[in-house]
Image: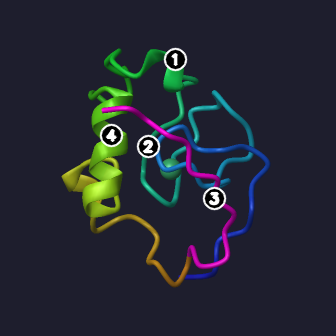
């Protein structure tokens, strides 16, 4: 897989700058969350396209490197995302 390029927008799930824009229903190559515009202010709302809450997806990313278990084989390898900008945001579980 090619190295990922920095996007201008931060993924609400994995906190990498992996998206071109927010709310564009773009699938994040790092965690496979589909960005429907939901963010940390709506952590416990079930996301339509993702079928889980953002809180659960963020926890999944921390535990297994993808927004849900089905996406584990699909996400970028650690090598491919190496160097991609990330500003990790705190979530209080
Ligand atoms: Zn992501």
Residue occupied by mark 4:
57
Residue 48 vertical position relative to residue 80 in the rendered view, above or below: above
Residue occupied by mark 2:
33
What is the distance, in whole Å, between disc 3 and disc 1 at their CAs?
Answer: 19 Å
Label 1 vs 2, first from the N-terminus: 2
What is the distance, in whole Å, between disc 4 and disc 1 at their CAs?
Answer: 14 Å
Quarter-of-image position of residue 46: top left
Q: Residues within 10 Å of mark 2 (few under 14, many from 20)?
A: many
Residues at circles 2 and 4 in contact by the CB criterion of under 8 Å:
yes
- Residue 86 locus on image (x, y percent): 63, 58
Label 4 vs 1, first from the N-terminus: 1
Residues at circles 2 and 3 in contact by the CB criterion of under 8 Å:
no
Residue occupied by mark 3:
86
Label 2 vs 3, first from the N-terminus: 2
Q: Residue at x 53, y 34 (%)?
A: 35
Is 48 contained in the magenta span? Answer: no
Q: Is mark 2 within 8 Å of ligand 1?
A: yes
Check disc 3 and report its element: helix, strand or loop. Answer: loop
Q: Is mark 1 within 8 Å of ligand 1?
A: no
Label 4 vs 3, first from the N-terminus: 4
- Residue 85 locus on image (x, y percent): 69, 63
Q: Which residues are magenta?
A: 81-93
Residue 30 or residue 1, whichever sits in front: 30
Check disc 1 and report its element: helix, strand or loop. Answer: helix
Q: Residues within 10 Å of mark 1 (few under 14, many from 20)?
A: few
What is the distance, in whole Å, between disc 4 and disc 3 at their CAs?
Answer: 17 Å
Label 2 vs 4, first from the N-terminus: 2
Check disc 4 and report its element: helix, strand or loop. Answer: helix
Q: Main secondary structure of the magenta part?
A: loop
Numbered badge on residue 41:
1
Check disc 2 and report its element: helix, strand or loop. Answer: loop
């Amino acid at each position: 897989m090619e190295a990922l390029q920095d996007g201008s927008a931060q993924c609400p799930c994995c906190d990498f700058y992996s998206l071109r824009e927010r709310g564009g229903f773009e699938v994040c190559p790092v965690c496979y969350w589909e960005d429907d515009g939901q963010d940390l202010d709506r952590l416990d709302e079930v996301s339509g396209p993702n079928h889980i809450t953002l809180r659960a997806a963020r926890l999944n990313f921390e535990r297994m490197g993808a927004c849900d278990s089905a996406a584990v084989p699909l996400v970028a390898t650690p090598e491919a995302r190496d160097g991609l900008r990330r500003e990790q945001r705190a979530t209080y579980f």
